[in-house]
Amino acid sequence: MAQGKGWSRDDMAKRAAQELKDGFYVNLGIGIPTLVANHIPDGVDVTLQSENGMLGMGPFPYPDEVDPDLINAGKQTITELRRSSYFNSAESFAMIRGGHIDISILGAMEISEGGDIANWMIPGKMVKGMGGAMDLVAGVKRCVAVMDHTNRAGASKFLPQCTLPLTGRNCIDMVITDLGVFSRGEGEARFRVTELAPDIEMDEVKAKTEADLDWSVL
């Protein structure tokens, strides 16, 4: 983890990678989650799945390894592995909808205290499409959201209720931000503060959080 106050984007991705277990099938969303592929822990063998039809993705390529035909769902160039396989998007979404993916790590614009997520559009701005997030939050066994704790204006993105169009309701199990880690177990109504990022105090987290969380853990 980086030194200094709070976590960088790479730090958040590295922390999210700690949620991966050996043998997992994993889907990584657009944005910070794509960086998780570079931080898979030693000794942990996972298979990365992409909505556009690839199973078994490697890390991002070095400049001399770039193949424009090898891309993830976010249109970023990636590498393949000896075990990689390719198929159409219908089969890819059948894997997701059939409950065959163990964990999805998603970016988020907003998260509610009840585990709702908004991450696919901002009204009035051009949207290329909703992507696969709605299927992921409905079909994947566990969903982790990774995001900055506040927006560019400094307003909280961890809210009592999402204000942007929802991607899914009551579906997020863990939130990782630049300030810390927030978790909720099965049947728990609220997120618990389970970890603080370096040099972050609880008072700062409270000041930047509008959601009603369980603050008693730390």
Image (spheres, rainbow, N blue to C red):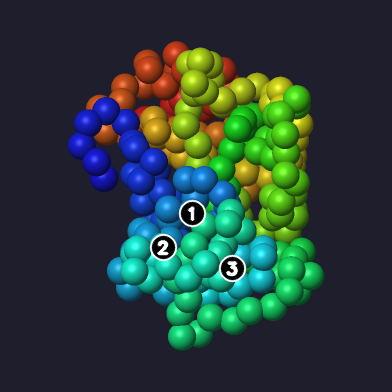
* Residue that sits furthest to the left in the current view: 3
Q: Where's the C terminus, which quadrant?
A: top left
Q: Which residue is mark 1?
A: 34
Image coordinates for residue 19, horizontal then vertical, percent: 45, 56
Q: Nearer the viewer, residue 58 or 127?
A: 127
Residue occupying image coordinates x 53% and y 81%: 84
Q: Whole-Å distance between the Cαs marked 3 and 1?
A: 12 Å
**Residue in view at x 59 percent, y 68 percent:** 49
The quadrant in which residue 108 appears is top right
- Relative to 64, is 121 above or below? above
Q: Quadrant of residue 42?
A: bottom left
Quick check: marks 3 and 2 in contact, CB under 8 Å?
A: no
Asked if the residue at tag 1 contacts the one at tag 3, i.e. Cβ–Cβ closer than 8 Å, the answer is: no
| Mark 3 surroundings: few (<14), some (14-19) or many (≥20) residues within 10 A | many
In this figure, which residue is indicated by the disc labeled 3?
Answer: 49
The first of marks 3 and 2 along the sequence is: 3
Q: Residues within 10 Å of mark 1 (few under 14, many from 20)?
A: many
Q: What residue is at 72 percent from the left and 44 percent from the top?
A: 128
Q: Dot 2 lies on which element? A: loop
Compute the Cα span from label 1 to label 2. Answer: 9 Å
Q: Mark 2 belongs to which amino acid?
A: Phe
Q: Residue at x 71, y 23 (%)?
A: 163
Q: Look at label 1 and name its amino acid.
A: Thr
Front disc: 1 or 2: 2
